[in-house]
Structures are given as C-alpha cells and as structure tokens.
C-alpha cells in the first residue's frame, strides 16, 4: 500500500538536511539560505507562524555575521508573515520597525518604504489610525512620484474613512493625489490610476460610464466587471429591475469568460443580483435558473462546500414563496430547460 507524499515534504526534508550540514560545517551563509527556502515553502502553505520562526533564525544568523541588509530583509519577511496571524501583530510591528530603521541606515529607500507600508497596515488593523497616519506621512509627502507614495496615499484614504464620522472629503483628496501620482510615474501607470478612480467613485458616486470606457480601453476585465456590478446595484436601488436583471446576467457571463483571479467571486455576485432583480418582477423561473446554474458552476470551480452555501439562498426564496409555489416553479424551470437548453451560463 502506498501513501501520497504531502506537497513539498521531500523538498523540506532536503532543506532540513542542508541546514544540519551547514551547522556541522559552521557555514552560517548556507544555513541561512536553506532556512529562508524552508520559510518560503511554509509561507506558501499558509503556515505563517512557522515561516516567521524560521525567518527569526535567519535574522540571528545575519546579525551575528554583520550582514545588516540580510538582517533587514529577514525582519521585513518576518513582519509580513506575522501581520495577519492573530496575536502576533506586536511582534510583526517590532520586526517591521527594525527593518525600516536598518534600510534607512543602508540608504535603501524603496525597501524602507515597503517596511513602513506594512507597519501602517498593521496599525490600521489594530485601529491605531493616528499612528498609521504618522507612519505614512513621510512616504505621502515624498516630492518624487513612486509606487510606495501611491500606496501610502491609498492607505491614508482608509485612515480618513476610519474617522468618526468618516472624513469622505479627505479620503477623496488623498485618492485624487494618488491618481495624479500614478499618472506621473515613469512610465505612467494608467491601470493603477484607474484602480484609484474606481475607489474614488465608490465614495463620490460619480457617473460610471467614463470609468467603464477607460477600463474597456485598457482591457482591464476585473475593473470592467466590478463597475458593471455597481451599475447593477444602482439599477436595483432605482427600482429598474428588468435592466438590472439583464445587466447582471451579462456581467456574470463576462466574469466566467474572463478568468481572472476573482472572476468566480464576481460570477457569484452577479448571479445573486440577477436572482434579486428577477424576484422583484416575479420572474421566479429566472430566479431559480440564476441560482441553480450558479450552484453548478460554483461546485465545479470552488467545491461542494461552497456550493452548498447557495442552498441557504434557495431555501430563503422557498420560504418567501411557499413550498407549493416553489414546487410549481421547479416544474416550470424544468420545462424551460427542456425547451431552451441550459439556463444562461
């Protein structure tokens, strides 16, 4: 009887052997290299705490050898690994602070900026908006356009929105400055500028048409579909249910064909919006079609457990309509499929 080897298990064993050999040979450079590779594998597997433990060992080796750039890099990696681990944010913040200070001393401005950005994200997670603002201020005030400056401005917009009440005008101003900065990068990053414009539109509720035209011109599928989902939500809010339903089905078809990172999530969102819109105009066959076709797609793409979550939505409509009417809708849907083929996409 054979047993499947866990992913990367053989590579981890080889690296452990390399670590032991390096220790025996008193070779800290080789030991640090093997530990770093192990940490990367554990991080890829989602075991961020183990990855951080290994990076700490790399830090100790680098400091002992006087390799301060390697030490800064290890501290930055440790901070990133621990940032989203519950209860470890304080250690992550300490590591990132040390990394930023070392990179400053070494004149590594880009790496120092990255450390500051990661530290600000932790501070925002902890609800320490004023500290995050202080951390981000030097990056945002930099005279030259850079990607860290754009990111700092995005995070400062989050800081503004975290105020009570939210400082929407301040957030919009930061995003506008970020848009201008992205356009003046070398070369200009129009896709990055568009992402900030989309964030701004969510606050200002400006007309989406111009942004859609820009997204179409740039060929940015995920932004196109996100904006069309917003359009659908706006149509629902305005009680324009038929065009909302039609746009939702069109949008989910585009999401399915696009195949980008979050296309499955957008497909699911469009399906739920289509069902809501069709329910408002009492087209229950299309409600059922939107949800059942989505369920089949989600099970194929994301697995049975995720697909079963849609059963809760179906149960909700069954309770709203009544079991007897639901049975009638199922029969009508089956007849629809027999006559027209599978529903939508």
Image: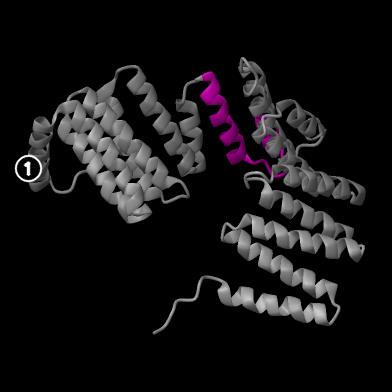
Q: Which residue is mark 1?
A: 335
Query: Which quarter shows the N terminus?
Result: bottom left
Q: Is residue 15 left or right of residue 45?
A: right
Q: Is residue 229 left or right of residue 210?
A: left
How far from the left and from the top, in percent, is residue 298?
33, 49
* Residue at the image point whose x is 26% and y is 50% from the top: 296
- Does 182 appear in magenta? yes
* Residue at the image point whose x is 57% and y is 57% from the top: 46
How far from the left and from the top, in percent, is residue 61?
84, 65
Quarter of the view holding residue 66:
bottom right
Which residues are drawn in magenta? 178-204
| Image vertical order of residue 133 relative to residue 268, above or below | above
How far from the left and from the top, in percent, is residue 303?
35, 54
* Residue at the image point whose x is 87% and y is 45% from the top: 101
| Residue 109 visible at all | no
Residue situated furthest front in the rendering: 87
Quarter of the view holding residue 320:
top left
Give the tally of numbered discs. Answer: 1
Coloring basis for residues: one colour
- The kind of secondary structure element at disc 1 is helix
Judged by its main secondary structure, the magenta piece is helix
| Residue 208 visible at all | yes
């Amino acid at each position: 009887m054979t047993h499947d080897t866990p992913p990367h298990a053989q590579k981890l064993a080889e690296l452990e052997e390399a670590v032991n050999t390096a220790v025996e040979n008193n070779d800290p450079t080789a030991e640090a290299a093997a530990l770093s590779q192990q940490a990367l594998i554990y991080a890829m597997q989602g075991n961020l705490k183990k990855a951080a433990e290994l990076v700490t060992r790399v830090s100790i080796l680098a400091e002992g050898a006087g390799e301060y750039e390697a030490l800064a890099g290890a501290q930055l990696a440790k901070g990133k690994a621990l940032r989203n681990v519950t209860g470890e944010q304080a250690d992550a913040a300490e590591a990132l602070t040390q990394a930023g200070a070392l990179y400053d001393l070494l004149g590594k401005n880009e790496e120092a900026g990255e450390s500051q950005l990661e530290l600000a994200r932790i501070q925002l997670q902890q609800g320490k908006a004023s500290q995050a603002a202080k951390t981000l201020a030097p990056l945002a005030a930099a005279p030259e356009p850079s990607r860290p400056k754009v990111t700092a401005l995005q995070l400062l917009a989050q800081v503004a929105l975290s105020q009570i009440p939210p400082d929407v005008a301040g957030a919009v101003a930061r995003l506008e400055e970020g848009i201008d900065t992205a356009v003046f990068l070398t070369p200009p990053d129009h896709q990055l500028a568009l992402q900030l414009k989309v964030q701004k539109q969510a606050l200002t509720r400006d007309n989406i048409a111009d942004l859609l035209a820009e997204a179409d011109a740039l060929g940015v599928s995920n932004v196109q579909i996100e904006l069309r989902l917003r359009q659908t939500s706006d149509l629902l809010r305005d009680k324009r249910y038929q065009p909302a339903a039609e746009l939702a089905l069109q949008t989910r078809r585009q999401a399915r064909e696009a195949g980008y990172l979050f296309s499955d999530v957008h497909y699911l969102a469009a399906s739920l919006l289509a069902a809501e819109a069709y329910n408002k105009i009492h087209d229950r066959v299309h409600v059922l079609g939107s949800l059942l076709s989505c369920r089949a797609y989600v099970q194929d793409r994301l697995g049975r457990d995720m697909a079963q979550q849609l059963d809760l939505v179906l149960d909700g409509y069954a309770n709203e309509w009544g079991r007897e009417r639901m049975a009638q809708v199922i029969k009508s849907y089956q007849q629809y499929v027999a006559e027209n083929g599978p529903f939508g996409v």
